[in-house]
Amino acid sequence: MTIPEVLKKAIVQMPQKEKDKLLLRLISKDKILVQRLDFELIEHGDTVQLRRDTIKQQILKSAQMTHNTPGWMMMDMRHLSGEISQHLKITKDKYGEIELTIYLFLTFFEHQSSLLLIHNSKSDSCAEYIAKRTDSILKKLAKFNPDYYVDFEKDMQQLLNYVHSHCPKNYARQLDIPKHWP
């Protein structure tokens, strides 16, 4: 909703104390904005690595759990992917988004390989999800400065090997996901 010019001028003319009250009321309604401001103003942006490590611990804990089906496993991966997205919204850490997403899939491939080995009706949606997210990671990496490729080369190649040798391989072919990167 756009604010009419007359209202903008009236807001600017309000006393500072009243504007501050209104601003605080508005900010408190947006959870992500509150967390982002806390990160920037209180933590001074110094806790990015700590936040990454916390998410990595969540990923490892979830990947080590017993998943009876690929569907349950995919639910956990999607939940963790949401945590990564929230991390990005709060910290604007694009490097961390890629690092954590690669770590997410590698960890699940390492701990739940038996569920991801064969493509069948139970693993189909999980296979498609992994392939599409891998394609998304590659597109985001393409936007990065090539100097950063060295940081991701080993893990990305390992992920591509898993994707092309496990259940997502058919979707990987459809999406033209390369077997080698960069």
Image (spheres, grey):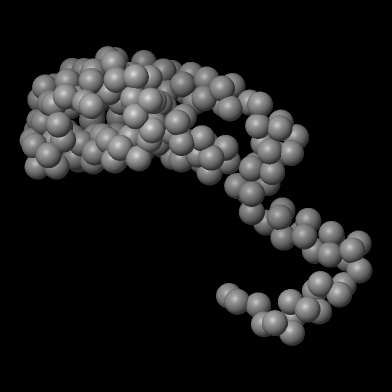
Q: Where does the C terminus fall, quadrant-wise?
A: top left
Residue 102: x, y in percent? 34, 26
Residue 71 in view (yes/no): no
Residue at the (17%, 20%) spot, across then down: 161
Q: Where does the N terminus fall, quadrant-wise?
A: bottom right
Residue at the (87%, 72%) spot, across then down: 14
Residue 145: x, y in percent? 38, 33
- 63 left or right of 22 in image: left
Identify the image quadrant of residue 46: top right
37 to 169, vertically: above or below: below
Residue at the (19%, 40%) spot, across then down: 128
Residue 85 in view (yes/no): yes
Residue at the (27%, 35%) spot, across then down: 138
- 43 left or right of 2 in image: right
Q: Nearer the viewer, residue 138 or 18?
A: 138
Identify the image quadrant of residue 129: top left
Q: Nearer the viewer, residue 88 or 182?
A: 182
Residue 168: x, y in percent? 15, 32
Identify the image quadrant of residue 181: top left
133 to 163, vertically: above or below: below
- 148 left or right of 29 in image: left
- 3 left or right of 153 in image: right
Q: Nearer the viewer, residue 124 or 146?
A: 146
Tally the marks: 0
